[in-house]
Amino acid sequence: MKLLPRKLYLTLLIPLLLLLLTVRCRETNTDGPKKVAVVISTLNNPWFVVLGESAAERARELGYEATIFDSQNNTSKEAEHFENLIATGFDAILFNPTDSEGSVSNVKRAKEAGIPTFCMDREINSLEVATSQITSDNFTGCVELGEYFVRKLSKKGKYVELLGLVGDNNTWNRSKGFHSVVDHFPELEMVAQQSADFDRSKAMEVLESIMQSNPDIDAVFCGNDAMAMGAYQALVASGKADSVMVFGFDGAKDVMDAIKDKKIEATAMQSPKQMARTAAELANEYLNGARNFSKKTPLQVKVVTQENIDAFGAYGSTN
Amino acid sequence: MMGKLLKYSIITIIILIAGYNSVTLSPLDEVKKSQNDAVFNARAYAENFISNDVTSLPATEVTEFLSQISEDLDGYTEQYGKRLGISDAYNFILQGTGTVSSMEEEYVNLILENEKSIHIATDFIFGNAIRDGSAMADIGDYQNTMDFNSISVELNNIVREEIIPPFMKKAKVGDEVLFKGAVTVDVTDPQSDSLKIIPLLLKINE
């Protein structure tokens, strides 16, 4: 038998070896339950911990092996997680992005590897790569919160707005929803609008600083509940907690308790539990053959006030 | 020496003119607005809908609607209401005739043929009742959800600016009013005795 020329042999063998290596890198999981990755922007915030744990819990209930990855609010860390979970053969990703633009390429890589991604809470700026995006209807929630705000202030007064992270779509969806109502009432004057990065301590510092030049405010609208708690602390420290109304957004436990205690006026209840469960259930449908998904699934956000607080539990659970 | 000075002066002037003309400073808000306008013009989209689609928009008779939701709120809203994503809030397009019984700060109260009353909103025109009740737009078609939200904002602006003022100039207690409008019903808090209809059409029968 005549051997193949050495050059031709190498030409065929090397690509074959490379192909085998590539296939080996994307392990297939034939034994045991299918694997679902839950990739969360940060686990340094109780709200996102609830989101991640609820997603993993529902995935496990549905018979999957679920692993939570913490991106630590870092898009590079998130990219590493995606590389690893693609290589180790995960079957679906329940994903809370760190960045609406920067996270698109990660989801695209997963799609190219045949892994469906279901975004939770935060959108990515693409309709093409994620299988579905399950998010809170932040804008409408803040429209309703804005109406309540206007009525509580009897359509007049001075207020401060504390924004979340300026690069986050949710920050602007909330702010725009609020202003789409409040700006129609000319006797409501916004004396300051500053970012406190969704952070409690920073909100306290920012509001303390604002109140030095604006001591006569009537209300503070905060883009999340952590900032609402920080704002409330600043008001307590300055002896104005009883005269200035604070409004938050999220439905976090400490703010729900503060509403019950009549310290904070209202919040808008997002449900990380429902969002996470919906994402896990859609992933389950996908893995069982469904392919027709709505590109975006918004979840209703409800206004929680001192009048209706008894109908709600923290993080979207119902009493 | 003089020639060199002239040469460098001309070169400097050319660089300054080229630099000045190659850089334009504009407020960030204006740039963002013009970029958004280029992508999607929510006002034009909303105006087109109000001008061309409202008359032919299918609507439920308000008396029939009130009767159905009082009998089976959950069943009726689930079957006939339109909602956005996962929500307890269902939207409907309604039409009917009623008599003005009072004119309040935020609404006009109409008494219907069946003696029930509804509120035609004249202030606090907010929310998504028109957009979602008419199903004129699908959120899945909008990469930027703010574009989708802007449709509601502009629809409400048109109602506030163009539909309500001419009606309020003429309307008085005792007038018979023909209306078409949108309503949102939250099944967890239906408030069916004081439903607020965002008007799309208002006509006083002379």
Image: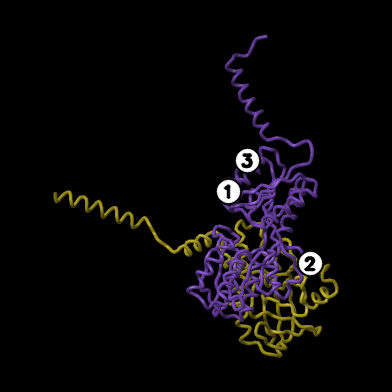
- Where's the N terminus of chain A, which quadrant? top right
- Frontmost of labels 2 and 3 is 2
Q: Residues within 10 Å of mark 1 (few under 14, many from 20)?
A: some
- How many discs appear? 3
Q: Which of the labelled discs sits on residue A319, or is there none?
A: 2
User: In front: B117, or A230?
Assistant: A230
Q: Earlier in the sequence, mark 3 or mark 1?
A: 1
Q: Secondary structure at mark 3?
A: helix
Q: Which of the labelled discs sits on residue A83, or is there none?
A: 3
What is the x, y in percent for residue A89? 70, 38
Q: Residue at x 71, y 90 (%)?
A: B174
Are dots 1 and 2 in contact, CB under 8 Å? no
Chain B shown in which color? yellow
What is the x, y in percent for residue A318? 77, 65
User: In front: B157, or A44?
Assistant: A44
Q: Earlier in the sequence, mark 1 or mark 2?
A: 1
Q: Residue at x 67, y 41 (%)?
A: A85
What is the x, y in percent for residue A273? 73, 58
Q: Which of the labelled discs sits on residue A308, or is there none?
A: none
The image shows residue A212, relative to residue A73, as above or below, that is below
> What residue is disc 1 on?
A75
Write down the chain letter for disc 3.
A
Q: Identity of the amino acid at label 1? A: Thr
Q: Earlier in the sequence, mark 2 or mark 3?
A: 3
Q: Residues within 10 Å of mark 3 (few under 14, many from 20)?
A: some
